[in-house]
Each structure stands twice: as structure tokens, then as C-alpha cells.
């Protein structure tokens, strides 16, 4: 059994975390299938998993010692657990027991597997296996929803005969089917993606600046463009952190999402996500925020016929990021929504904010802009530009990510 770089998972480094259920024996077969599909595999086991299968079996099949505890100094010397978390291009938890799903949903870090899952920035896939009543329990349903909302891929479970003679949803999906599902979310089916191995931070959506406990200043950004760009970058093999303002959108597969509300929170979250190779500022960040938040609801009585709200400028996250020398950025991309003089304003922003690329679109016309699924835009960079004719945002995002990959090589 040799790893082939051209298989459907060619070149991917997969950290397989094995949970403590009877289906753990199938994880042995999964290691074989992952390697046949071209992946490199390292295995970490929970204490429970070791009651069902031995680390030695995983070592024989994966070609690497299986990791079993945080407290093994010789294993830590070879590759520390944080290094292992960084090594992984993706993390697959199989079988994911009810207990393990709960611990992942709550961000616990009380053993090796939970710590690895918390420490990694790689996309997470969970492959649940458990008794059908445990799978259908509201607690498990809620935990799975939390993981999904964070961008985890949930594979299975299948319906059918379970241990102890019962039957229902809870069977671990067959190893071949797991590999097929993992491959279906892999960047590009053949060969590495255009952004393989790069870390991309994307901001998306509006920000809400609170005035009092019931009111805020917001804008009409839907987040669709930023979410489409994040999804496209992930399909091209990038490790993506999506910092999202308040929007009602599903997290794209394989993307790590951080939800924020205000411009100040967005600035914090973007800063915490750095260093990265690429920053794409697609969010419509409020340029002004109320000078003071009123802890009590602002009443009409006492304010009269007019109300002046004192606003102060927010820091320009994009310009700040572009200036940072410790962020490791190779490319900084901004957006500009304009109603007129598009090219002039966009080029001014490109220079003033020291960007590598700016994407400008016309707002205030029907069939494009904020809430629309379609858009048209022009990208400008020093010495060049490219028009993207009207198309669905999902298609435009693919085109933009391709351009980003080209500009990286320039
Ligand atoms: N941006 C940011 N932080 C801010 C404001 C804007 O990061 N506080 C980023 C946006 O994510 C976007 C770009 O800057 O990539 C938009 O630039 P901006 O100059 O704010 O554009 P407009 O809002 O169109 O500005 P203006 O009102 O000056 O036209």
C-alpha cells in the first residue's frame, strides 16, 4: 500500500482522531483507504479508543506511531502536539462518539484528541457512530448543529443494524464512502488547488454598531460575496478563517468561521487570525460608530424633535492589516463599493490603503450589489485591471480567487 500523490486525497496530511466506540475497528480500514487515496495519515486515539483497538495496529497501517496521550515526553520530543495540530491539512474524527462530539462542541481540551481539535486551524470532519437513541438525543443534535455552524463536515451516520442487536441511524459510514465524501470537499479533484497550503483570512458581511440595547447602525451588506470567496479559497486548498459580521448564511465547508458584531470586534478577530498569507477584506465595515453606547434605551421624552448622534471614525481594518509587517501577508485585497467614478475611487483606495488588489463594484443599480446573488465588478492592481462581467457571486468568487493566485505569482 503506497500513498499516491495523484489519488483523490493526493498529498493531503490527515490527522485521524479515533474515538472510543465499537466502530473504532473500522478506523483501521479507514487508514488503509485514506492512504490508498494518496493521503499521509497520522493517528491520535482517545483513552476509550484504546479499549477497542491498539495503537500498534494503527502504527502498522499508518506508518507512524499512534499518539495516545498529551503526557508522553518521547512522543512530544519527536513531534509536539501543537506541531501535529499544525501539520494537519485536515482533521478527521472517526468514530466520533456522542461524548466526543459534546466535548468538541464545547471546546474542551482535557485529553490529546480534544486538545488537537482545539489547537488546529485545519478543517474538521466528524464521522459519528453511536447508538441511535444517543444520535437522536436533543443534546447530540444540538452539539452536531454547533459543529456544523462552525464549518465542520459531518459524514454519516448510516442507518442500519447497530451493536447490541438494535437498528437505526448511528452506523459509522463505510470507509470507502468516508474517503469519497472527504474527496468531494477537497480543493481540486486532480492535483493541488491554486491556494494549496496557504492561509487566507476573509472578512465578510456588515457590522452593527450599537446605539442602545435595542438599536444599532448597520448596512445592507448580505455577506454573500465574502462567503463565496471564502468557500472558493477553501475549494482551492487554502486554510480559511472567515470573520463574519451578523449575517444569515451557512458556513462554507472546510472554513473556520468567527462571528462578530461590531467593527471593533471584527478588528480584534482579524488580528487574532493573523499571521496569514492572504487577507481579503470583503466586509462592509462601519466607518463610524456611536461615540458612546447608552446602556438605557434612548427615550423620546427629553430629546425633542431632533436627535443628534455623535459618531466617531472606526479604525480602517484593511489599511491597518496592509501596514502590518509582522502579519506575514503576501497579498492584501480590498473591496470598494462605489456609485460613481468607480475606477478613480478604487485606484485611490488601492494606493491610500497600500493594497495589492482592489475589487470595485457599482452599488445602487438593480441586479447587482448588496443583497443580490449576482454582481459585476472590476479588479484593479498597480499596473493592471480585469473586468468581471455580470455573473452569480459564486462564479465571480472563483474568478477572483484565480486572479488572487495569479497576483501571488506576479
Ligand atoms: N474597511 C475596513 N475597515 C473599515 C472600513 C473599511 O477594513 N473601518 C475595508 C472594507 O472591508 C473594504 C474597504 O475597506 O475592503 C472599503 O474601503 P472604504 O474606504 O471604507 O470604502 P467605502 O466604505 O466605499 O469608503 P468611502 O465611504 O470612503 O467611499
Image (cartoon, rainbow, N blue to C red):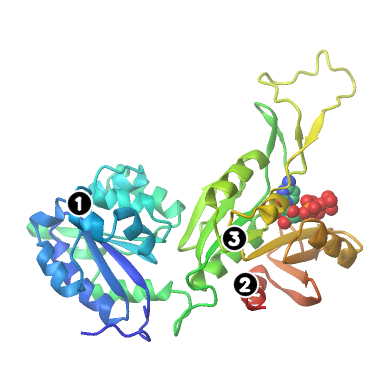
Task: Mark 1 vs mark 3: give the one in front.
Answer: 1
Mark drawn on residue 159: none
> How far apart are the two marked residues, 2 and 1, measured between alpha carbons?
42 Å
In the figure, residue 370 lies in which quadrant?
Answer: bottom right
Q: Is residue 274 above or below residue 179?
A: above
Residue placed under numbered mark 2 in the picture: 401
> How far apart are the two marked residues, 3 and 2, measured between alpha carbons?
12 Å
Q: Position of residue 58 (x, y in %)?
A: 16, 68
Q: Is residue 394 visible?
A: yes
Disc 3 residue crowd, few under 14, some 14–19, many 20+, Cα 10 Å: many
Q: Which of these two is toward me, 375 or 287?
A: 287
Q: Which of these two is toward me, 360 or 69?
A: 69
Q: Position of residue 354 (x, y in %)?
A: 76, 59
Tag 2 secondary structure: helix
First in sequence, mark 3 or 2: give its number.
3
Task: Mark 3 vs mark 2: give the one in front.
Answer: 2
Quadrant containing the C terminus in the rendered view: bottom right
Residue placed under numbered mark 3 in the picture: 227
Residue drawn at x 16%, y 62% is: 24
Tag 1 secondary structure: helix
- State left or right for residue 261 relative to residue 179: right
Residue drawn at x 24%, y 55% is: 76
Q: Is mark 3 within 8 Å of ligand 1?
A: no
- State left or right for residue 194 relative to residue 3: right
Q: Is mark 1 within 8 Å of ligand 1?
A: no
Disc 2 residue crowd, few under 14, some 14–19, many 20+, Cα 10 Å: many
Residue placed under numbered mark 1 in the picture: 73
Amino acid at each position: 500500500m503506497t500513498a499516491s500523490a495523484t489519488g483523490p486525497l493526493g498529498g493531503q496530511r490527515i490527522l485521524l482522531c479515533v474515538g472510543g466506540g465499537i466502530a473504532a475497528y473500522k478506523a483501521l480500514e479507514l487508514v488503509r483507504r485514506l492512504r490508498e487515496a494518496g493521503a499521509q495519515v497520522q493517528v491520535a486515539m482517545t483513552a476509550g479508543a484504546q479499549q477497542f483497538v491498539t495503537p500498534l495496529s494503527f502504527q502498522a497501517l499508518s506508518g507512524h506511531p499512534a499518539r495516545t496521550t498529551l503526557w508522553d515526553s518521547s512522543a512530544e520530543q519527536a513531534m509536539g502536539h501543537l506541531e501535529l495540530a499544525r501539520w494537519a491539512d485536515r482533521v478527521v474524527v472517526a468514530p466520533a462518539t456522542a461524548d466526543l462530539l459534546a466535548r468538541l462542541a464545547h471546546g474542551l481540551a482535557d485529553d490529546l484528541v480534544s486538545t488537537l481539535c482545539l489547537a488546529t486551524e485545519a478543517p474538521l470532519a466528524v464521522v459519528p457512530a453511536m447508538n441511535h437513541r444517543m444520535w437522536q438525543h436533543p443534546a447530540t443534535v444540538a452539539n452536531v448543529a454547533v459543529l456544523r455552524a462552525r464549518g465542520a463536515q459531518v459524514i454519516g451516520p448510516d442507518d442500519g443494524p447497530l451493536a447490541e442487536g438494535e437498528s437505526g441511524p448511528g452506523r459509522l459510514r463505510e470507509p470507502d464512502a468516508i474517503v469519497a465524501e472527504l474527496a468531494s470537499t477537497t480543493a481540486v479533484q486532480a492535483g493541488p488547488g491554486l491556494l494549496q497550503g496557504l492561509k487566507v483570512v476573509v472578512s465578510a458581511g456588515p457590522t452593527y454598531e450599537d446605539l442602545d440595547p435595542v438599536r444599532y447602525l448597520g448596512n445592507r451588506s448580505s455577506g454573500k460575496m465574502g462567503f463565496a470567496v471564502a468557500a472558493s479559497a477553501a475549494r482551492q486548498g487554502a486554510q480559511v478563517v472567515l470573520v463574519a459580521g451578523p449575517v444569515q448564511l451557512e458556513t462554507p465547508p472546510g472554513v473556520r468561521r468567527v462571528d462578530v458584531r461590531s467593527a471593533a470586534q471584527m478588528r480584534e478577530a482579524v488580528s487574532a487570525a493573523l499571521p496569514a498569507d492572504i487577507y481579503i477584506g470583503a466586509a462592509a465595515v462601519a466607518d463610524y460608530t456611536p461615540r458612546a453606547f447608552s446602556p438605557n434605551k434612548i427615550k423620546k421624552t427629553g430629546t425633542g424633535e431632533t436627535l443628534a448622534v455623535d459618531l466617531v471614525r472606526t479604525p480602517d481594518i484593511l489599511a491597518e492589516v496592509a501596514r502590518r509587517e509582522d502579519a506575514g501577508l503576501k497579498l492584501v485585497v480590498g473591496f470598494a463599493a462605489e456609485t460613481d467614478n468607480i475606477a478613480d475611487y478604487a485606484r485611490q483606495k488601492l494606493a491610500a490603503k497600500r493594497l495589492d488588489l482592489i475589487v470595485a463594484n457599482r452599488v445602487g443599480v438593480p441586479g447587482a450589489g448588496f443583497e443580490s446573488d449576482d454582481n459585476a465588478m472590476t479588479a484593479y492592481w498597480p499596473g493592471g485591471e480585469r473586468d468581471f462581467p455580470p455573473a452569480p457571486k459564486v462564479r465571480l468568487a472563483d474568478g477572483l480567487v484565480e486572479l488572487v493566485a495569479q497576483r501571488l505569482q506576479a
